[in-house]
Image: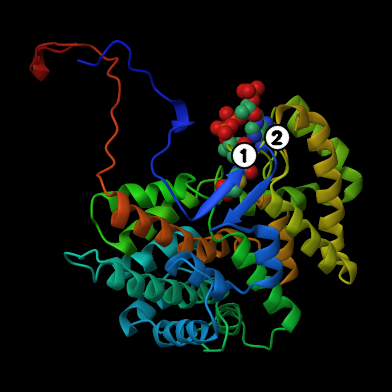
Amino acid sequence: MMEEAATVSKGLEDVYIKTTKLTTIDGNKGILRYRGYDINDISEHGTFEEVIHLMVYGELPNKEQLKALRDSLKSHYALDKGIMEVISKLPKDGEPLGMLEVAFSMLAMKEKNYKWEPKADREKAIDIIAKAVTIIANIYRVKEGLPVKEPVIKEGYAETFMATCFDKPVSKEVISSMDKALILYTDHEVPASTTASLVVASTLSDMASSVVAGIAALKGPLHGGAAETAFKQFEDIGSVENVEQWFKHNVIENNAKLMGFGHRVYKTMDPRAKIFKRYAEMFAKDNPKVDKYFQIAKKLEELGVQKFGNKGIYPNTDFYSGIVYYAMGFPTYMPTPLFALSRTTGWLSHIMEYVEEQQRIIRPRAIYVGIQERKYVPIDQRH
Ligand code: CMC
């Protein structure tokens, strides 16, 4: 029987499951840092490969280390024939995160008795991070009715991804924005998806299976799924003139949640949302279709902050990111798969940190509140 004093922390709020040197968030001041580097600084000056190095190996790379990492990624982008074949047979109308689960599960299928060991873990992490490019690019291609394609290996991670997705050249501006978006979504301490990955890794399962758990948790509309629903909200509104009426009807009168707003940790505007807003504005300047969504989002932000700001509910990273991805040429189902592409590095960095330094199986308790004890009744005697 449970101790009388036991209480449930609903949603595990304020429960700390590990220590970390990876990411810190100051939710009141709106600060996010990766290993001490402010998100504004690192996303403005760094590349995603540098961030991968920082998270996986602990420090920003020097030139030789960066070249070695890029070479290593290049040697791991390709997928086995069997995985490419399975991806090619996935249904065009499949739900993309479910499709990601299938493809990443095929990486897990190769893992039997995985031995956790720092050097092998890092090699495995780089392998999975590289393969994520080819998996996600090809899931995009399948959904667009295009044939699957071997990775088009370029110098950078973002460029390789874009060249694998698209069959026509992608501008430097778009590749650079993709690189920044990857940095912005890399890690965020221990949200639901990272926690799901940690639970799996804590059993000493393998790294690919832990990523599958992360993807499964990311899919939900309260977490990564919000990146897509936030954008669909703007599509639903349709024009800036409709924002007030839409907000009144849905949010005020029918208590709908504003997607892309609110956060368990931030009680002010998410610093990533501010950066994505700047990118959205940049793309809106010379693209009227993007500008339409940007104007809708700005107006919705204004109304949302007026209504919810005093409760500490502000735009989160998913509010403007969908507009940026739309401007880059991605369809509306892509924001969440793109979130997964980036967050794979965060999940893997956290599970390595946990298993290597703090490993213990994550096994919480539940307080039993059901009937204490009763006798089995045969089925023909039940009413
Ligand atoms: N719109 C309207 N009200 C909200 C919102 C919102 N987006 N978010 C929270 N609230 C209200 C909620 O109704 C509750 O009100 P009351 O105290 O009157 O019952 C209060 O704020 C606390 O909300 P909560 O759901 O208990 O907060 P939480 O910390 O458990 O949830 C959250 C955080 C992100 C799930 C929630 O804010 C939410 O559902 N937001 C919308 C979905 C979203 O944008 N998710 C992306 C999160 S950030 C990036 C990511 O992880 O993907």
Question: Where residue 33 is drawn, which disc sits there?
Answer: none
Q: Quadrant of residue 335?
A: bottom right
Residue 78, quarter of the rendered image: bottom left
Picture residue at 89% right of the left edge, 72% below the top: 286
Is 169 on the left-hand or right-hand side of 62? right
The residue identified by callout 2 is 313
The spot of residue 75 in percent (x, y) is 40, 87
* Residue on which disc 1 sits: 263
Vertical placement of residue 162 versus 192, above or below: below
x 42%, y 78%: residue: 88
Task: Say if disc 2 is inside 8 Å of ligand 1.
Answer: yes
Is 260 situated above or below 256?
below
Q: Secondary structure at mark 1?
A: loop
Crowd tier of the residue under label 2, counting other residues whose Cα lies within 10 Å: few below 14, some 14–19, many 20 or above: many
Q: Residues within 10 Å of mark 1 (few under 14, many from 20)?
A: some
Kindly tell me whether mark 1's CB lies below 8 Å from ligand 1: yes
Query: In the picture shown, does residue 210 fall above or below 29?
Result: below
Are the two marked residues, 1 and 2, in contact with CB atoms closer than 8 angstroms? yes
Where's the C terminus, which quadrant?
top left
